[in-house]
């Protein structure tokens, strides 16, 4: 049984930023649309088995987050009974731990 994939309001804003960044670099709407679609497809490919993604550990403890790498970005989500809850989509070279965990 596949989990329902839900994006938090913050993750949706992150996706808007990804759109803006990719479009600024490419100046190509089709390429940007494809990039975002592939990123979301990659995340949603874990809906059937969300705990098969990479678990995020900090200071030797599981944070409750799993993550998926897509090119320059990382998508962080939590796996709950019937939902895959995407909390953030962050640039891989950013201080994503500080952003995600505060």
Image: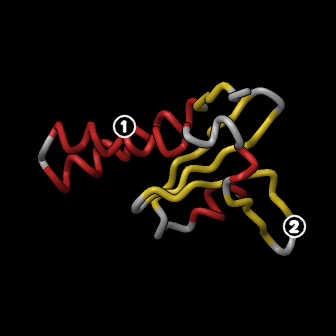
Q: Secondary structure at mark 2?
A: strand
Residue 27: where, in percent of width, then height?
A: 12, 47
Q: Residue at x 40, y 62 (%)?
A: 72
Asked where in the image residue 8 lies, by quadrant, the reply is: top right
User: How packed is label 1: few (under 14 Cα within 10 Å), some, or many (20 or more)?
Assistant: few
As drawn, the residue found furthest toward the right would be: 61
**Vertical comparison of 67 with 29: above or below:** below
Residue 17 position, x and y percent, is 37, 44
Q: Residues within 10 Å of mark 2 (few under 14, many from 20)?
A: few
Question: Which of pointers 1 and 2 lies earlier in the amino acid sequence?
Answer: 1
Image position of 3 (left or right of 38) = right
Q: Quadrant of residue 5?
A: top right
Q: Which image quarter is the N terminus in?
A: top right
The residue sitting at the front extreme is: 1
- Position of residue 90 measured from the top left corner of the image (x, y, whole percent): 50, 54
| Mark drawn on residue 61 | 2
Colour pattern of the rendering: secondary structure
Q: Secondary structure at mark 1?
A: helix
Residue that appears at 16% across and 52% down: 26
Report, in whole angstroms, how far the alpha carbon at label 1 lies from the one at label 2: 32 Å
Closer to the camera in the image, 33 or 102: 33
Q: Which mark is residue 37?
A: 1
Q: Given this view, does label 1 or label 2 mark the residue nearer the observer? A: 1
- Horizontal and vertical percent position of residue 21: 29, 51
Question: Is 70 or 87 nearer to us in this picture?
Answer: 70
Q: Which mark is residue 97?
A: none
| 56 lies left or right of 29 | right
Q: Residue at x 68, y 36 (%)?
A: 48
Report the label total: 2
* Residue drawn at point x = 63 percent, y = 55 percent: 67
């Amino acid at each position: 049984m596949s989990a329902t994939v839900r994006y938090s309001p913050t993750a949706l804003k992150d996706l808007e930023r990804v759109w803006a960044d990719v479009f600024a670099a490419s100046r190509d709407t089709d390429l940007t649309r494809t990039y975002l679609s592939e990123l979301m497809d990659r995340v949603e490919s874990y809906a059937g088995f969300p705990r098969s993604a990479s678990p995020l550990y900090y200071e030797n403890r599981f944070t409750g987050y799993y993550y998926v790498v897509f090119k320059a970005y990382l998508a962080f989500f939590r796996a709950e009974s019937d939902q895959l809850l995407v909390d953030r989509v962050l640039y891989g070279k950013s201080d994503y731990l500080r952003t995600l965990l505060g």
